[in-house]
Amino acid sequence: MTVVVVGNPKPMSRTRAAAELIATRLTGSAPTAVIDVVDLGAGLLGWGDPAVAAAKKTVIEADSLVVASPTFKATYTGLLKLFLDQFGQGELGGIPTFPVMLGGAYNHALAPELTLRPVLVEIGASCPAPSLYLIDSEFETSPDLDNWLEIAKKFAPTVVAP
């Protein structure tokens, strides 16, 4: 089960579209679940919210994760941080996870590697491939995506047709 987690404050964002495309191309099948963190609302500001707990359970049960955010101030969004803070150290138990960030220019291309990957590893994700940064206006046709997929597919579970 591949799960996509999207930390864009805008629902149904380009970040979500990119993350779903990446998950599909990475595993050969559409993601099983998409958590658009913005939909969790104020429940992210405390502990024990039922919708947040359900989203956490979905993430913990995943076989692989694509975690995506737009680039805000050279890092991932505070919204995504609120969701990731709901997980304890090591709680993801080694789930193969692929950090992805979108931005308007390559001057922030190291942001997913330097900011998103470390927090994912702290909560127990295994990030076996390099993090991915894409220009948001060209994510669908980016040669960077194709190059990254060549590496990342070695580490992603694939869906086998019955």
Image: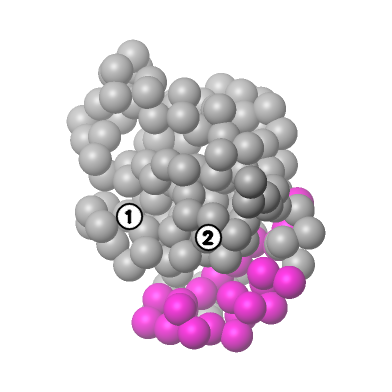
Residue 110 picture quarter: bottom right
- Please tell me which residue is depicted at 26% across the width and 44% down the height of the picture: 38
Element type where label 1 sits in the image: loop
Q: Amino acid at mark 2?
A: Thr
Q: Position of residue 73 (x, y in %)?
A: 40, 63
Element type where label 2 sits in the image: helix
- Please tell me which residue is depicted at 23% across the width and 54% down the height of the picture: 11
Q: Residue furthest front?
A: 162
Residue 45 in sight here: no
User: Which is nearer the eye, 139 or 105?
Assistant: 139
Q: Position of residue 102 (x, y in %)?
A: 45, 69
Q: Amino acid at mark 1?
A: Asn
- Please tell me which residue is depicted at 29% across the width and 17% down the height of the picture: 50
- On the image, numbered disc 2 is attached to which residue? 24
Q: Coloured how?
A: one colour
* Residue 4 vertical placement versus 107 (above, below): above
User: Which is nearer the eye, 56 or 28?
Assistant: 28
Q: Position of residue 56 (x, y in %)?
A: 45, 27
Q: Are marks 1 and 2 in contact (CB under 8 Å)?
A: no
Q: Is residue 162 highlighted in magenta?
A: no
Q: Is residue 105 left or right of residue 93?
A: left
How many other residues sit within 10 Å of disc 2, few (<14), some (14-19) or many (≥20)?
some
User: Which is nearer the eye, 54 or 101?
Assistant: 54
Q: Position of residue 36 (x, y in %)?
A: 33, 46
Quarter of the N terminus within the rendering? top right
Q: Is residue 17 left or right of residue 4?
A: left
Residue 2 in sight here: yes
- On the image, numbered disc 1 is attached to which residue? 8
Labels 1 and 2: the sequence-earlier one: 1
Residues rendered magenta in the picture: 128-150
